[in-house]
Image: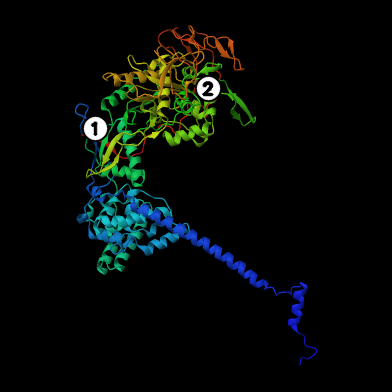
């Protein structure tokens, strides 16, 4: 029987349940909740780190695999033979390649074979630079891990490099201090040791490494410092040479003999400690070291060299620069290392030069009329539609040195109006916002140029003819070289950023400034912060002759190594589609109209009797630069004239005249042929007043446009009388015409007179064409030019490239 004081819990809970009251449950402690949260957080962090680690490991593995797949770019066999590279050109009569020139290096290096290098020299370098050289496979992993740790903390990793790695660093000239460079070096070292023996690697090292005072290799060093061959050097002398390479400036025996003494005696001690020399040899070498003398340079009377006065032409200069850059890119080495390959590895270079035209263009540049402008310079490039450079010249003066400053490829110049057919107008046609006879606005834009001092915008740009026409047809806008229409069209097709993207991704322009993608005048009328080269402009015009394609310019067909394996081949280069074939055709015909009907620019001087010439002129503020870029059915040619220190040119007809002279010579014995025009661009006669189609049958006359079915105007009235655009019309500021002349001279197409003015930021006015007297036109208002007018990126200077080319 239960005690009265006892409580029947079961009865109590049953009653609570019946009444709907739930008994309270004991909550878990706060500490347990905290641990759960921390645990989840740690698990999340661990998972993220684990996944990140996996991704990083996979990415690193892929990167290392990619590095391992790259060629080393090192041919020790060719280096040991110190072979001369040769240039081959096509014989104009047979079409076969014949050897023309050999390339020699002026570097102070005398290759010595492994058997002629004393053992003391080999042991000295191994003792101080890589004592486990014969034990590792190209990488000393213990030293490498230590060096990577040093690099990660901001130090230099030089101490971790084996002889094999140092050889690679010297040959590739890769001096970047980074983990990436170390990985490249490691993968190449492992591959190199698979391809060559230790003796071959050591021989190359002792012939390649810098031993101070422009001595490349131990033989050159022995002759400079001791006036003897390395094979005759003593143990102490070998140690003195070996001590230089780690820091050629600090251990230079001619400048710092006491410091070299300290260094060479450290090497002797290392050799003794490593058991490479006996104590007797060690003591004798120390005694010799204590009283060692160095010779240095002697005055040597050089024998007369039959080729001392030979200077290579402008083409071979540019071919050298092109090949150097291409080899550096192909092998992932520096351009300095690529230059070394050209001079020492027996390459065969199959040059794309047209020898006759190269001689002609250089002589034509020297003979160019410079009356009134005695210091006038020229840069000109003739190029095939596939990017092949036919001929090139970089100065109006006779060439006196190899690898000289080349105004056709080194100078970043302001192109003026010659840039208009490269971007704004073809972009408008390609996007079908323009057709051949479209009406375009010749009026200023409100916010053309920003003035920081006043925080205001000014309208612009100005036109060279001193006014605005309001509306004009596209052929007239090009023939007048209107600045305002070019800027209006650029706004219409996406602004300067769209043109900039086209320039750098599709058409090979590499000298523009980043700010040119924001300045509306840069790629519309040619007033840039950066610039363009003459060669870039020539390549930029090729699309009008090859169906809208861009090919990277080249000066050699292909190159082989010393065993005739092809390294780089330009013969089957894949082009970029810059514009459609139809756009290329329409632009070609627009620039044909520009040359054939030239009244307001100097394009008339580019005409060549019997040939269909296409092209565009360009000048800059105050006539500081003058251009003509054009093409015939066979090739393109771009020509610039100006001064190294920009100032006004007295006669801006010279570029167009130079084009006519040189292109005329090239075409002299050529068969007549037509341009490659798209069958989808149909010819039609248009009304020059309205731009509307008059007829698509029996097309003839002056006003012939080219149209695609999906981008053409409607039909209109055929009557236009004796119309000549611009004769009695000028812009009043309200997109209408007023009855007043913007020129003082007659404007009709048959008048034989042309007005003279100055171009403002790309716009231009012509000088007398020769068919009549030139009359002075209205003064052009000063426009803006981003570069300040005729600016240059870099001044003419002597190249410091070593080496020369000598004819056979």
Of 339 and 527, the residue lying toward us: 527
Classify 645 as above or below 567.
above
Query: Which quadrant is the N terminus positioned in?
Result: bottom right
| Mark 2 surroundings within 10 Å by alpha-carbon count, few (fewer than 14), some (14 through 19), many (20 or more) | many
In the picture, measured across the screen, residue 142 lies left or right of residue 492, that is left
Query: Which quadrant is the C terminus positioned in?
Result: top left
Where residue 141 appears, as percent x and y from the top left, is 36, 63
> Which disc is residue 196 wearing?
none
Q: Image quarter for residue 554?
A: top left
> Which disc is residue 485 wearing?
2
In the picture, measured across the screen, residue 790 lies left or right of residue 136, that is right
Where residue 275 appears, as percent x and y from the top left, is 28, 68
Residue appearing at x 67%, y 73% in the figure: 28
Q: Residue furthest right?
A: 4
SS of the residue at dot 1?
Answer: strand
Residue under circle 1? 89
Residue appearing at x 32%, y 39% in the figure: 323
Of 15 and 25, the residue lying toward us: 15
| Mark 1 surroundings within 10 Å by alpha-carbon count, few (fewer than 14), some (14 through 19), many (20 or more) | many
Q: Does the rendering let one see residue 544?
A: yes
Residue appearing at x 33%, y 40% in the figure: 324
Q: Does the rendering let one see residue 787?
A: no
In the picture, measured across the screen, residue 615 lies left or right of residue 42, that is left
């Amino acid at each position: 029987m239960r005690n009265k004081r006892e409580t029947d819990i079961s009865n109590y809970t049953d009653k609570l349940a019946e009444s709907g009251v739930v008994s309270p449950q004991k909550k878990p402690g706060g500490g347990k909740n905290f641990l759960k949260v921390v645990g989840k957080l740690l698990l999340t962090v661990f998972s993220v780190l684990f996944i990140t680690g996996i991704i990083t490991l996979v990415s690193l593995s892929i990167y290392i695999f990619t590095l391992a797949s790259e060629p080393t770019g090192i041919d020790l066999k060719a280096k040991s033979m110190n072979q001369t590279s040769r240039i081959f050109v096509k014989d104009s009569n047979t079409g076969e390649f014949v050897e023309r020139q050999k390339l020699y290096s002026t570097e102070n290096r005398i290759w010595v074979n492994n058997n002629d290098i004393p053992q003391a020299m080999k042991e000295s370098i191994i003792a101080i630079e890589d004592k486990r050289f014969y034990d590792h496979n190209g990488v000393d992993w213990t030293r490498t891990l230590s060096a990577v740790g040093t690099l990660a903390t901001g130090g230099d990793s030089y101490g971790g490099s084996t002889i094999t790695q140092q050889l690679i660093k010297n040959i590739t000239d890769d001096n970047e201090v980074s983990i990436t460079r170390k990985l490249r070096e490691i993968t190449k070292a492992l591959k190199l040791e698979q391809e060559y023996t230790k003796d071959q690697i050591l021989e190359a090292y002792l012939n390649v490494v810098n031993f101070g005072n422009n001595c490349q290799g131990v033989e050159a060093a022995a002759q400079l410092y001791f006036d003897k061959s390395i094979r005759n050097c003593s143990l102490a002398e070998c140690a003195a040479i070996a001590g230089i390479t780690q820091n050629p400036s600090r251990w230079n025996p001619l400048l710092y003999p006491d410091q070299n003494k300290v260094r060479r005696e450290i090497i002797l001690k290392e050799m003794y400690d490593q058991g490479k020399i006996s104590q007797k040899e060690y003591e004798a070498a120390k005694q010799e070291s204590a009283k060692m003398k160095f010779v240095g340079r002697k005055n040597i009377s050089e024998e007369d060299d039959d080729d001392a006065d030979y200077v290579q032409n402008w083409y071979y200069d540019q071919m050298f620069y092109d090949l150097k850059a291409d080899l550096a890119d192909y092998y992932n080495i520096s351009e300095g290392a690529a230059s070394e390959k050209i001079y020492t590895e027996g390459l065969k270079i199959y040059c794309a030069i047209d020898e006759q035209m190269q001689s002609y263009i250089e002589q034509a540049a020297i003979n160019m009329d410079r009356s009134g402008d005695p210091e006038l310079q020229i840069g000109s490039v003739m190029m095939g539609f596939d990017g092949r450079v036919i001929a090139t010249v970089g100065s109006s003066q006779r060439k006196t040195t190899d690898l000289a400053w080349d105004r056709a490829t080194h100078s970043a110049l302001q192109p003026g109006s010659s840039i208009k057919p490269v971007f704004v107008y073809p972009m408008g046609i390609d996007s079908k916002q323009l057709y051949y006879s479209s009406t375009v606005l010749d009026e200023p834009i409100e916010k053309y140029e920003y003035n920081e001092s006043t925080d205001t915008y000014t309208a612009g740009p100005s036109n060279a003819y001193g006014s605005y026409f309001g509306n004009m047809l596209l052929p007239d806008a090009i023939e007048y070289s209107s600045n305002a229409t070019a800027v209006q069209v650029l706004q219409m097709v996406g602004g300067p950023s769209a043109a900039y993207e086209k320039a750098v991704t599709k058409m090979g322009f590499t000298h523009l400034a980043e700010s040119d993608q924001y300045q509306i005048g840069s790629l519309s009328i040619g007033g840039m912060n950066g610039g363009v080269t003459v060669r870039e402009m020539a390549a930029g015009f090729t699309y009008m002759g090859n169906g809208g394609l861009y090919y990277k310019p080249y000066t050699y067909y292909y190159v082989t190594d010393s065993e005739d394996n092809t390294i780089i081949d330009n013969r089957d280069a894949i082009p970029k589609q810059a514009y459609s074939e139809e756009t290329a055709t329409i632009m070609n015909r627009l620039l044909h109209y520009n040359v054939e009907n030239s009244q307001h620019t100097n394009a008339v001087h580019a005409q060549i009797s019997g040939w269909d010439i296409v092209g565009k002129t360009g000048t800059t503020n105050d006539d500081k630069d003058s251009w003509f870029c054009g093409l015939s059915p066979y090739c393109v040619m771009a020509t610039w004239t100006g001064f190294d220190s920009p100032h006004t040119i007295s006669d801006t007809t010279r570029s167009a005249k130079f084009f006519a002279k040189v292109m005329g010579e090239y075409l002299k014995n050529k068969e007549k042929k037509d341009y490659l025009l798209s069958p989808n661009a149909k010819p039609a006669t248009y009304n020059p007043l309205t731009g509307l189609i008059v007829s698509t049958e029996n097309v003839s006359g002056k006003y012939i446009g080219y149209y695609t079915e999906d981008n053409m105007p409607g039909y209109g009235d055929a009557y236009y009388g004796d119309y000549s655009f611009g004769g009695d019309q000028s812009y009043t500021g309200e997109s209408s015409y007023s009855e007043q002349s913007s020129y003082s001279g007659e404007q009709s197409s048959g008048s034989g007179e042309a007005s003279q003015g100055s171009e403002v930021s790309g716009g231009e006015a012509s000088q007398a064409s020769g068919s009549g007297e030139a009359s002075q036109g209205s003064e052009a208002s000063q426009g803006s030019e981003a570069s300040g007018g005729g600016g240059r990126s870099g001044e003419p200077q002597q190249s410091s490239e070593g080496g020369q080319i000598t004819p056979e």
